[in-house]
Structures are given as C-alpha cells and as structure tokens.
Image (cartoon, rainbow, N blue to C red):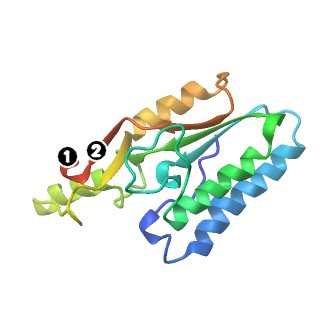
Amino acid sequence: VHAAARVTTPFSSADPHLFEQVNHRGTAELSYILERSTHIRQLIYLSSTSVYASGGGAAGHTTEPAPGSWYGISKLRGERMLDRLGEQLQGNIIRCGNVYGYSRSMRFDAVINRFVFEAHFTGRISIHGDGDQGRAFIHIDHVAESLAALIGDALPSGAYNLIARNATISEIA
C-alpha cells in the first residue's frame, strides 16, 4: 500500500515543487523499483479525488481527470507512473474523497476536522464562500477498512473512487 504523500492541499500553491517531488517523483522511484521486482504482485496507491476538476458536479468512474491544484496534478502524475507498469502487477489506484476523522497528525485543512475544531474551541464555525461548494467525504476508518479488504483481493487493475458521501459545505455545517 503506497500512502506516502504530501497532502496539505491549501499549501500546494506555495511550494508546487515539493508536491511534485514527493507525490510524483517519489512514486516514479517506487515504480522503477517495482519494474525490476519479480515477487511483488499487487500495489495499492492512495490517490485523491483532487485529480478531478472542481465545480463540475460529482465525479464518476468515467469522469476524465482535470486537476485544479498542484496537489491534484502531482497525484495524477503519480498515477500515470504506475499505469505504465501495465500487466506486470495488479495496480489499484484508490482516489479518496476528503478524509476526515481522528489521527495522530490531525489535518485541520480538511473541512469536517476544521469545523469540529472551531466549534469546540470557539463555539462557532466559519464558512468561506457561499457554502454551496461540493466535496466528497470519507471517514478515515472507512478508508482503513477498505484498504485492508483490498490487500490480496483480485480487484482488476484500475482507478477507483472511494467516497462515502457527496455534500456541500452548508450541508456539513
């Protein structure tokens, strides 16, 4: 399971080179190692629904990627590095929605985590924009369960979206 990535999306514009180096080039290096390997048969790559354009409604399995951030671009480039392995191994690209929930390194750029933090510490939440912005969401526990179920599974190679729910920011609030 390849889950290593630079993920703090709001900061990807401040240092796109870092996101490119970690998310794209780091995955490229892994792909070169896998190319020479004869014993690894499956790779699960954690990507992101950020590879899709924002504002175009819910993305489905036939939606063409069109990332709008350096983070999304770097994740899509990482996917392409693994695509080239073709039939050599089973490659499952899992595009997660906004992951929320407790972790030792909490991400407060994720809207649900930020809302919970603000509500707890300030007694109110703040919405940037009109609140009609749509997002795909999934809880970290669901991601972990899904990844565990995929290990050793015969899921055909390809990209899959892993989300639990699409909602607007106002609905979440």
- Give coordinates of residue 80: x percent, y percent: 70, 51
Q: Residue furthest bottom?
A: 14
- Give the residue type at disc 2: Ala
Residue occupying the point 54% across, 57% down: 66
Asked if residue 139 lies left or right of residue 96, the reply is left
Asked if residue 121 lies left or right of residue 23, the reply is left
In front here: 149 or 97? 97
In front here: 5 or 47? 47
- Give the residue type at disc 1: Glu
In front here: 142 or 81? 81
Above/below status of 94 relative to 117 = above
Give the residue at mark 1: 171
- Give coordinates of residue 53: x percent, y percent: 47, 56
Asked if the residues shown at circle 2 and circle 1 are in contact, with their CB atoms under 8 angstroms apart, the answer is yes
Give the residue at mark 2: 167
Residue 6 seen in render: no
